[in-house]
Amino acid sequence: MAATLSNCCFSALNSTVKLRGCSVSTRPAFSTLQTSLSSLTPNNYKNRLCRSTKASSSSSAHFGREKESVSGKEFRGRRDERPSIYADGSKSRGDGGKAQTTAFKSFGMQRKDKKEKEKESVFDRKEQQVEAGNLQDATFLNAVVKVYCTHTEPDYSLPWQKQRQFTSTGSAFMIGDGKLLTNAHCVEHETQVKVKRRGDDTKYVARVLARGVDCDIALLSVDSKEFWEGAEPLELGRLPHLQDAVTVVGYPLGGDTISVTKGVVSRIEVTSYAHGSSDLLGIQIDAAINPGNSGGPAFNDHGECIGVAFQVYRSEEAENIGYVIPTTVVSHFLDDYERNGKYTGFPSLGLLLQKLENPALRACLKVKSSEGVLVRRIEPTADAYNVLKQGDVIVSFDDVRVGCEGTVPFRSNERIAFRYLISQKFAGDVAEIGVIRAGEFMKVKVVLNPRVHLVPYHIDGGQPSYLIIAGLVFTPLSEPLIEEECEDSIGLKLLTKARYSLARFKGEQIVLLSQVLANEVNIGYEDMSNQQVLKLNGTRIRNIHHLAHLVDSCKDKYLVFEFEDNYIVVLEREAATAASSCILKDYGIPSERSSDLLEPYVDSVGDNQSLDKDYADSPVSNFEIGFDGLIWT
C-alpha cells in the first residue's frame, strides 16, 4: 500500500479529513501521493485525489494545525521518498509507493499484527508525551503560544468566489522585535489570526508579515503592547548532531494546555518539504509530533531553539518519525525578509542532473575522476540556460567538489545532497560552477533565482485569475485546481503537460476553459470543461492576461478559440459582448474578470518563436522522478 504524505496540522475529527500540516482544523484534510504516470489512468487519478484518507496506518502527515473538519485530497510524490504529513494532520505532496514498502521489507522489518501495534503505539505515547516535570517552570516555555486561524480558501472551480471558512489551531513562538514564527500552512489563506500566551485567557489579533511557502515558515506580528509584557523571546541555536536530545513544545490535540514531548535527533539531510514541494535541509527526530504541534519550537538541552516542528512520516513499516525545520533554514527566511522587505524564496539552478556512478558513463564524458553530475535538462527561465549546455558535467560549486552521486562534504565526516549548497544562497546571488565540457575544464558564473513553475503549487495573492467571455470561463491551470477538480476530469493529456512541461518564459500559463455557463450565445458548447485553449484568432495565448488583452483589442467579427485536439469555438464578438451582463446576472457573478486582469497588459516576451516548441519530455520536479538517478537542483 502506497504511503501517504499529509500535513499534521489537522485533527482528523471526520473520516474524510483534509490534511495540510500539523495544525488541528475544523474541516476535512487532503492528500495522498501519486506514484508514476504509467499508472495514471483516469479512474486511478480520481481514486487518488478524491478518496478520503482511509489508509491512515500507512500514511504520513503534517501536524502543524488542528483542523476541526477536513476534506480529502491527495498529492503526488516521488516513489522512493519517505512520505510526510504536516504536523496538523494534513497531507503533503510526496509518494511512498510500493517501492518504499519493498525497501523496508528487504531490511528484514516485519509487519506486526494490528493489536500488537496498537499496544505499542499507546505505550510509546505514554512514554513520550510525559509531563514537563523539571521543565514546568522553564521560562522558555512561556515564549510558545497557541495560534487560532480562520481560513477561507479560494474556490478554484468557481474562481470568483471563496469556499466556506473553517478554523484551525497550531503553535508559534516569540523571536523578538515583536515577531512570532509559525508554519506557513498554519496560516494559509488566513482571514483572521489570533494568538494566546501560556497561562493567559486573552487572545490577541496577529498579522502575517511574510509567508515562505517553499520552506513552510510564516512570520507574524502582534501590535498589542500588553501581549509582549514580560515576554522573553527564544534564541536560535546551532544545528544539532545525531543523538542530541530534543524537546518539542506546542499545543497539539488532546488538550488546551502546553504539551512537551522528548526524543533525539535521528538524521539530518535534505528533506522533501510537503507544503512547498521543495527540498531543503531537515532534521528527523523520534519525538512525538501530533496535530497542533505545527509551528512549535524544538529545543536542545540548553533551552535553545534548534528548529520548528512541521511534518511527520507515517507508514506500516516505520514509527515515530517527525521532522523539524532547522535554524539554518529559519535564519535564511528571516535574512531574506530583512534584506528585501518581503520574502523572495530559496533559489535554484534550474537543472535536471544525472548521477555519474557508472565508470563507462564517466569515461564517455571524459571525466577522469569519480566526481560530477551530468546536465540533462535546463529550465528556459533559468540563467543557467544561457551559460550551461546539455551534456556538461558539473564538478564543483563555489570551489566545493561535487561527488558522482550528487553529494558534497557536510560537517566533519558526512556528505549531503548538492542542493544544500544552493539553498544557502539568496535570490540574485552569483555562483561559480566548475564544468567539464567535451573533456575540457572551465568555470562559469550563474545567477541563482527561484524556480518558475508552469503549473504553480500555490497561487500568489490567494485568489485565482479568471475571465468570462459569453459564458466561457477561463482560468489558469494550477495544482490546487487539479486537486479540487479531481484528475480524471482534467484529463491525462493535460496532466502530462502539467507534470512534464517547463515554463518557456516567466509568466507563461496553461489557460483552461474551466466550464461553460449555458446561454443562447454559446449553444452547442455547454458540455465543454477543462480544455486547454491554445489560440485566439490565430494568436497563441501566453497566459490569461494575454487572452484578456487579445479579446479587448479584437476588432474582428468573430472570436475564434482554438483548443487542444483541434477543436474550435466560434462566437460572434458583438453578440458575446451583449450577452455578458445577462449571464453574469443570471449566475450571480460580480464581475466578468478578476481584478488583476483590469491592469494593462505588458508584453514581456515579444515575438517568441519557441512558443510552439514542445517541452513535455521529462519530469518537472523530484516528485515525478520514479528513481534515484535523476535530481532537480
Image: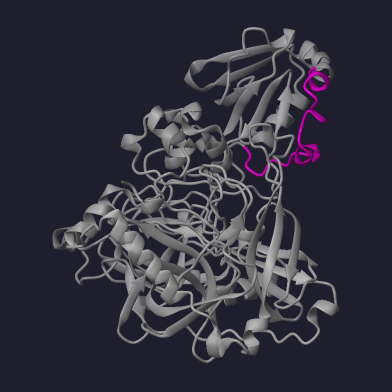
Q: What residue is drawn where x is 64% and y is 50%?
A: 26
Whether residue 443 appears in this view of the structure is no
The residue lying toward the viewer, choosing from 211 and 107, is: 107
The residue lying toward the viewer, choosing from 97 and 569, is: 97
Q: Does the magenta stretch include residue 147?
A: no
Identify whether 144 is placed above or below 356. Answer: below
Residue 274 image offset from top left, x and y in percent: 48, 57
The residue lying toward the viewer, choosing from 331 and 247, is: 247
Residue 258 image offset from top left, x and y in percent: 61, 74
Magenta-colored segment: predominant secondary structure: loop
Residue 502 image offset from top left, x and y in percent: 48, 44
Q: In which quarter of the image is the C terminus?
A: bottom left
Q: Does the magenta stretch include residue 594?
A: yes
Residue at the left extreme?
A: 360
Question: Going by the image, does 86 lie left or right of 437?
Answer: right
Q: In the figure, residue 308 lies in which quadrant?
A: bottom right
Whether residue 182 appears in this view of the structure is yes
Residue 390 image offset from top left, x and y in percent: 35, 53
Identify whether 18 is placed above or below 175. Answer: above
Question: Going by the image, does 303 lie left or right of 571?
Answer: left
Question: Going by the image, does 144 lie left or right of 224?
Answer: left
Identify whether 532 is placed above or below 306. Answer: above
Coloring scheme used: one colour
Magenta segment range?
Answer: 583-606
The residue lying toward the viewer, choosing from 557 and 97, is: 97
Q: In the figure, residue 44 lies in which quadrant?
A: top left
